[in-house]
Each structure stands twice: as C-alpha cells, then as structure tokens.
Image (cartoon, rainbow, N blue to C red):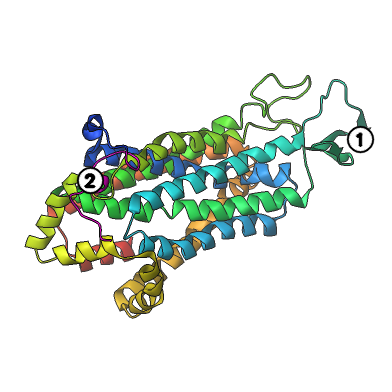
Amino acid sequence: MGVEMNSPRVTNCGLWGWRPSFLKIYNTPNMYLVLFSISSFAIAVTLGMNQVLIPTLQELFNLNSKQIGLILIANDLSGLVVAFIFGHFASKGKIKWLLFGVIVSFIANLLQSGTQLFVKLPELTSNVTESSGTEEKVMCTLNDGDNVNSVIESTFYAVQNNKLFWILFLAGILQGIGTSQAICGITYLDEVMTKKKLGPSIAVASIIGLLGYTASYLFGAYLLTQYVTLGTPPDGVTLGSGQWVGAWWMGYLAPGILLALSGIPLILFPTQMPAAKIVLREKIDNGKASQQEKDFELNRSFKKLIKDLLPTLKRLMKNKALLFLLVGEALNNIYVSSMAYDTKLLSQLFKISVTETGTLIGLLKIVGTLLGLALGGAFMGKFTPSGKTCLLFVVVT
C-alpha cells in the first residue's frame, strides 16, 4: 500500500498514531536544524576526544600503538562501509535512520566511558608500596565483578587486559556506524530547506560541528586536570605525578548525554515535513525533481531497496567526478587520522603535559577554524568563484 504525502502520519510530528496538534510549532526546518546541529556538535566532540585521550588510554589500559591504531581503524572502516548503506536505505525513513545512528553513537560513548568501571583504583594511603631507587611502584587491580585479577605493578594505574581492548574496539566500530547518520541528516535538510536557505543551513551545521571538534581539545585538556573520580585524590597524588589519572571517561560520557538529549527528539519529526512540499515544488520548477520520483522514493519497499543496492553502487562507481572526490577524501583522511597521535608526540617532543598540549591545539584550532570560515565566506561572497576555481584554491592551499 502506497504512502500518501498529505497523510498526517507522513507530515505531522509525533510517534505512530500519536500526532498532537501542539507539536506543529515544533515541525519547522529551523527547529530541525538546531537539534541536528547540536547532535553534530556532540558527535564531533566525541571524535575529537579520541585524539586528546589516546595517551591516557594507552597508559591506563597498557595498550600498544598497534592496538590504538586498530581502534581508530575500526571507527573509520565501519563508517566507510555503513555510509553507503545509510545513504541508500535512508531514501525512505531518513528520520528513523538518523535516530538509529544517534542511538548507536550513544551506546559507543557508554562503552568507552564504561571501561573505567573495570579499574579498581588503589588507595595510596593504605596500599602496599615498594620502593626501588627513586621510583615508587603502586599496586593496582582490575575490578572484574567477584573475580579480582592478580596485582599489577606500575608507576601508573595500568590495567593489562585484552577484554578492555576489545570493548574499545567494539566501541570504535559502533562509533563509526553512528557518525554515518550525518548523511541522513544532511539529506533531510536538503528536503526541507529552500535553495536560498540550504547553503547557509549546511554551513551552520558544519561550523557547529567544527567547533565541537576543536572544543574537544579544550574540554579534554580540562578533564585531564580533574581527578578520575571527580573527587579529592588520595594523599600523595598530585597533578603531574606518575599516579595521576584525569577524568578521561567524562570526555565520552558528557557528549553522549548531550547527543541523547538532542538526538532522541529527532524521532518526532515526520517523514515529510510540510516545508518539504515547498522545496519539492521549487525543485520541480527548476527541473531537478518530479512528483513521480518523490512518490516512487516514498513507496519503495525494503525488498526493492535491497534489490537496488548493487546496481546503485555500480552506477556510482562509473561516476568519474565522484571517484576523484572519494580518492581525494581518502588521502585527506590519511592526514586527519595521523593527527590522533599529535597530542602524544608533541607532549614527548616538547616535554610538556598532555593537558598543556591539548589546550594549545584546541586554541589554535578554534582560531584557525573561525578565521578560515570568515575569510572563506568573504572570498566566496565577494568573488563568487566557479567550481573549478574553488577546487584549484583547495589544491593550492
């Protein structure tokens, strides 16, 4: 049975058969833009935290560089695979897929922050310590329910357990899957914003996302100055000492809560917002869409979507412009992924703490981001360059 575009279940806010009239004030493109931008901010903070907190996670869980690399790769590869699937199936029910991505991202955040529960921090005032020269070894244990693993000696609260690596690896996979929901969010935005408002709306969502990414450095650096329990540290443990552990887990939990608060209300938005009719009419008048195409999109069955998956992929792979963009994005991601080690490398190179490094990088990124956006916007507004000119500018800079 087909879907009628004018049906209240399609155009009104609510859940299932509950479509109250008071939610009409909520059913606007601007409200959607606000919630989508906040969820993008939260996801960007989480992704940025991966780079800020790597030195802490590596030492806290006794992970080697290979394991850290696998966690980061799990994030990137899962997002790459799922992005196409999201883009294909989201042609029908974008809001539901968007909510799915938000929930998966929230679960990933809980897994990442929850690994701290496996660590039983020692009480230095009562724990047995061993002195060897100038180095003091502190006993710490892994809290695994009723089973407490053998004592590990370390100058840090190190926990060597493969279980924690696999939890972080799974969280990385889920994080990659969840962040791919941005595709659904942008395409829904394209449906409800007029041509005049679409560009600025995407710019707003992108800027807020970039600010979230840069803010993660400042927030992460601040959290590392707070003791892991958010309380008073044991006697003898001070910031900068070998036994200090910052409240790293809040770097994942806080944006996860923000993501849930902003993302879950998205499910109230309808399949087709009333504003989408105006946008569709505009596209029809410009020859970019037709009513038949929209009806076909809404009425395609799940079986039909699965059947069209491979033919769609083959058709996309024949698009040369798209292939060049994908290769360029892949090369750019090589550089972006290497930035995950910046905090640790700069700390070791210049003999400063991870907290100081994160603060400096965060400030530089905020200044650079705002300056780049301002200059880029002024350049585009004054000269209105062609697509080729913009690409040339990107290559040169």
User: Residue 133 has which mark?
Assistant: 1
User: Which of 82 and 348 lies nearest the eye of the viewer?
Assistant: 82
Kindly indicate the quadrant of the structure image that contains residue 357: top right
What amino acid type should be assigned to the residue bearing mark 2? Thr
Q: State the quadrant of the C terminus.
A: bottom left
In the rendered view, would you say 100 is above or below 224? below
Residue 289 in view in this figure: no
Q: Position of residue 11 (x, y in %)?
A: 22, 46
Identify the residue at image location x=41%, y=65%.
84
Give me the residue at 78% from left, 43% from top.
159
| Residue 91 image offset from top left, x and y in percent | 31, 60
Neighbour class for label 1 at 10 Å: few (<14), some, many (≥20)? few
For badge 1, the amino acid type reads: Gly
Q: Position of residue 1 (x, y in %)?
A: 28, 61
Query: Residue at position x 58%, y 56% from top?
Result: 72
What residue do we see at 33% from left, 72% from top?
322
Q: Is residue 199 magenta?
A: no
Q: Nearer the viewer, residue 188 or 290?
A: 290
Of the residues under marks 1 and 2, which one precedes in the sequence? Answer: 2
Task: Compute the Cα span from label 1 to label 2.
Answer: 73 Å
314 lies above or below 166: below
Magenta stretch mostly in which secondary structure?
loop
What segment carries the magenta color?
1-17
**Would you name the residue on which mark 2 appears?**
11
In the rendered view, tell whether residue 385 sits above or below residue 45: below
Q: Furthest-left residue in view?
A: 285
Compared with residue 227, is residue 7 higher up or lower down, i.e. above or below? below
Q: Secondary structure at mark 2?
A: helix
Viewer can see residue 187: yes
Give yes or no for residue 16 being in the magenta stretch: yes
